[in-house]
Amino acid sequence: MISSFHIQHYKGFEDFKVEHLKRLNLITGKNNVGKTSLLEVIFNCYNLNDHIPFFREQSWRTFLINIQPQLQNSTTVETLTDIWKSHFFNFETDKNITFTINYAEEEKQDKLSLQYSSNLHNSDMDSLLFTITRQGLMKHQTINYTINYSIEKNYINQGQSIQNKKNITPINFNEDECKNFLEFPFTFYSSAKFLTNYTKNLEDIFRNNKEKELIDKMKLIEPRLTDIALINNKILVGIGLNKKIDFYNLGDGFVRYFSIVLELLTIAKGGILLIDEIETGLHHSLYESVLQNILNIAQEKQIQVFVTTHSAELAESFKEVYKKNKNYLSFNQLIYNERTKKIDNIHSDAEMLEYKIEHNKAYRGE
């Protein structure tokens, strides 16, 4: 389980530390202060077996879609190279991005360094050099690999899809070695997009006879729920009507919570779940029960969960769960420090969070 991490020169984070991380971690803060970027750091660190982790991350933010109209009217790849450069603090690509992760159970440290370089011999090619280092008491291990990305100018002029024209070339990259190096079972659940493979996860639920547990958890949202079935890759639910209905008919809140619970029940022991803006679609009266259920499953399966929110009501509900489970929760508030011009993290224990809420002190980045 991650106990702390240090981010240097990544997006809005020039030099940023988060400590005191626990089983369930809530991250609050204003818009554009870096809450989602914080989740992306963890995602990128634990998807190093994927040759294009940064493209996947950008696609969730619809970056690859949004820049396409610009590319259609462009004769250069200048806009495209921002896929790399936008990851660097203040676009300063002469300085390396560094992620350093420390773990609670083991005296070890993982360090990921990313170096940008523009290919001087080919103006259409940029690359990132990844250096991954694991340090422990008994060993020191390093892996290097490079990702190159290119796109032909004539394709841009024709306005064709970037996704179909990318050329990823790993160099000195041993995929099996890297998979064993920094991989955890892991899911990034975005408020903008359902990223769950429902079919596969439901098959796992049925195969392991966990459908009753899933139904019991989902009764928090829909008390009438009696049955869940997977027919022709469609999820059908029984709620006491004459026949089962498509689960999407129960609304966004049900689908969202269903996705989260499904991930928690099927993710492997020791995994990581990242949930962006968890409150979306959920009624505020359910927040405390939702958080407690997530914590209970996470404790049972030794999963670590990171959650972001804007909601004062969710933070207040988190406070109630925090008071009952002080050793297993962590509350973190991201703020932009006008004096230092940096993003800072303010950690609050259960008593401090309660004090801030009851005395109307800042606890959401105000």
Image: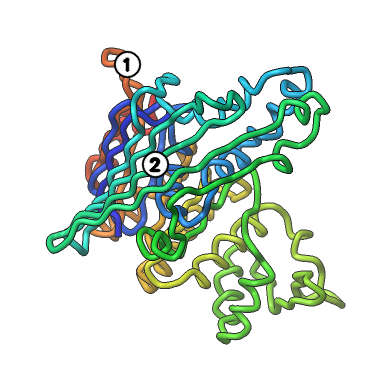
Farthest residue to the left: give it: 137
State the SS at label 1: loop
Query: Which color mode does the image show?
Result: rainbow
Q: Residue at x 76, y 75 (%)?
A: 238
Q: Residue at x 32, y 21 (%)?
A: 342
246 vs 211: above or below:
above
Specify the label residue 92 is tagged with. none
In this picture, residue 164 sits left or right of residue 149:
right
Q: Which residue is mark 2?
A: 27
Residue 121 visible within the image: yes
Quarter of the figure with the C terminus: top left
Q: Identify which amino acid the numbered label 1 is placed on.
A: Lys
From the viewer's side, name the closer residue of 207 and 361. 207
Of the image marks 1 and 2, the number of the one nearer the N terminus: 2
Farthest residue to the top: give it: 339
Question: Label 1: how many residues lie within 10 Å, few (<14), some (14-19) or many (20+)?
Answer: few
Q: Which residue is mark 1?
A: 341
Q: Identify which amino acid the numbered label 2 is placed on.
A: Ile
Q: Position of residue 200 (x, y in %)?
A: 65, 72
209 vs 29: above or below:
below
- Report the Cα–Cα distance between label 1 and label 2: 20 Å
187 vs 67: above or below:
below
Q: Residue at x 83, y 27 (%)?
A: 158
Residue 288 visible within the image: no
Looking at the rendered image, the disc whose residue lies closer to the viewer, 1 or 2, is 1
From the viewer's side, name the closer residue of 276 and 149. 149
Q: Are marks 1 and 2 in contact (CB under 8 Å)?
A: no
State the SS at label 2: strand
Q: Position of residue 46 (x, y in %)?
A: 42, 54
Q: Position of residue 278 (x, y in %)?
A: 52, 48
Quarter of the figure with the N terminus: bottom left
Q: Position of residue 98 (x, y in %)?
A: 32, 37
